[in-house]
Image: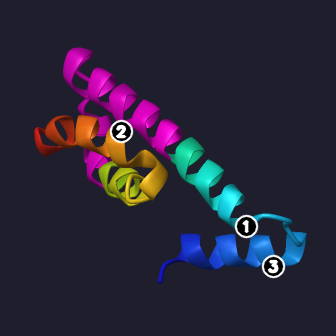
């Protein structure tokens, strides 16, 4: 049980969503897309451009991305990402 879950539950309760399942699915998709973009940029900046300070953030972004990829709607994407994430 982390802060993300706590905030999501609070948001869903306070906003009185009509379809919480659909919201969580869309949230997972957007969160995965965001974390994939950040992960790629940090690798680009850290390794290709020599800005190594960004590499220290990769473990956290990877953790968030792996958490996002646990959603069933992202099953195929997870299969594609796993080999890449294992290398970093």
Q: Position of residue 11 (x, y in %)?
A: 77, 71
Residue 27 x/y as whole percent: 62, 52
Closer to the chain start, of discs 2 and 3, is 3
Q: Per the image, is 38 magenta?
A: yes
**Which residue is drawn at the image coordinates 35% and 28% (left, top)?**
40
Residue underneath mark 1: 20
Closer to us: 43 or 29:
29
Foreground: disc 1 or disc 3: 1
Q: Secondary structure at mark 1?
A: helix
Magenta highlight range: 32-59
Q: Main secondary structure of the magenta part?
A: helix
Q: Measuring 36% from the left and 36% from the top, which residue is drawn there?
A: 39
Location of residue 85 in the rendering, given as x and y in whole percent from the top left corner: 20, 42
Colouring method of the image: rainbow
Q: CA distance from mark 2 to mark 3?
A: 29 Å
- Please give the label number shown on residue 77: 2
């Amino acid at each position: 049980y982390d802060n993300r879950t706590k905030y999501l539950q609070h948001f869903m309760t306070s906003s009185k969503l009509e379809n919480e399942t659909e919201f969580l699915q869309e949230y997972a998709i957007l969160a995965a897309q965001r974390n994939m973009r950040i992960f790629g940029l940090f690798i680009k900046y850290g390794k290709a451009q020599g800005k190594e300070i960004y590499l220290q953030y990769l473990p956290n972004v990877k953790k968030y991305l792996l958490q996002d990829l646990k959603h069933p709607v992202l099953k195929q994407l997870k299969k594609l990402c796993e080999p890449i994430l294992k290398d970093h």
